[in-house]
Amino acid sequence: MGVDAEGCEGLQVAGEPPAPGLESVTRHEDLVRLLAEEFARADVSLRELEGRADKAGGTRLPRATCADMLAGRRFPKKAVMVAFLRACRVPEQRLPAWEQAWERVRIARLPALTGQATAPGRPTTTGASTVAAQLAALPHQTAPAPNPGPGRRRMLVVAMLASLAAASLGVLAGFWLPGRGTSEPPRGRTVADDGRAFGQGGSSRFTVTVDPANTGVRLIRRLDAGIGMQRATITVNGVPAGGWQPLHVERVYRWKDQSADIPPSLTAGRRSLTVVNTFVSSYQDFNEFLYVVRQKVNGVWSTADTVDVGPEHAASESAHGYRITGPQTFAGVQEFAYPPALSGLTAAARAGNVPLP
């Protein structure tokens, strides 16, 4: 895996439409968001949730299972979700609404069926309404019809059953098919990378090299923005140096490159910087996949160092003394997309926010 990263366009989080409530959830990512909010309100660790579930008996809640569910990596079984909500102390009277939301999302994830296109601007009819429309279109009879024979009666029954079966299939298809003709978001550049994450009470530490003649240092962190509102403090050589500000949940382009400028007073004249990121808050945890260290020397920005985080990059972690203190909640590979590249570089990008071409 190369150490390329997208430009600062990925740092901007555009305004999002209001997220749906529990009663109208039909998408996996929205269900994950609401589960993460319950977890944040519960203010407990994954270890505590696991202990509560074990004490209550019934469905178990392994920490890895909860982490995958909250990160959207795996669609949970209904029993696991309910056990998780009970461990978060969600009132029992609210659980049926959660179960109904789970069922809607589960049905929406079923394989799509091929539907029949309708004329533009023409409403579709399915199920009983289709049968009613077909019956209404039949010519009205002014005289009683003759009594059909047994063979003809059987054929009529079979035809009616076939119509009802087709109508039922139309109901099911209309229930789980997404709106036809809706445009999908443009495809961004997909990147697979390994990384790590830590939760409450945790921190990460690493040491990087810089030019003593620098007049500015910028840390750029690749993160999974599918985990929302990640906040952490930064210290450099034991001195407070700012922090990582929270970003809203990104449901489509989950890779983000977030930057943090280090005060020049903490970097000038130094050849090495020991950086510590300490967890403050998040919907789930604080994740990190790659750090690119940029420095400004003689007015020109360049790359001073890179720290490739993750179990598949042990050499980079060792070379930079990387380690996590406290609970590690994730270690593995993720594959997401960056937003599509914009047509031109912004002024901020030309000033040095683009770490690599």
Image (cartoon, rainbow, N blue to C red):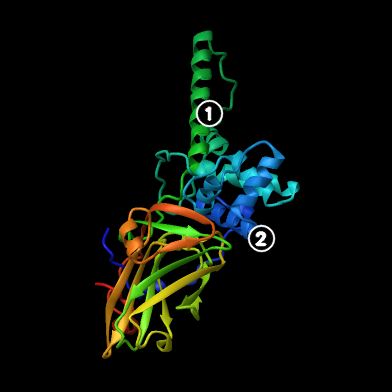
Q: Return the disc, 2 or 1, that comes first in the chain's sequence.
A: 2
Viewer-closest of 163 and 205? 205
State the image coordinates of residue 256 (x, y, percent, origin top left): 40, 67
Rendered position, 159 above or below 333: above
> Dot 2: within a 10 Å radius of its alpha carbon, few (fewer than 14), some, or many (20 or more) residues?
few
Mark 2 residue element: helix
Say what amino acid the circle numbered 1 marks. Answer: Leu
Quadrant of the rendered image containing residue 214: bottom left
- Which residue is disc 1 drawn over? 164
Q: Is residue 87 left or right of residue 188?
A: right
Q: CA distance from mark 2 to mark 1?
A: 48 Å
What amino acid is at disc 2? Arg
Q: Secondary structure at mark 1?
A: helix
Residue 345: assigned label: none
Residue at point 27% right, 72% down?
A: 356
Direction top: furthest residue: 150
- Which mark lies nearer to you, 2 or 1? 2
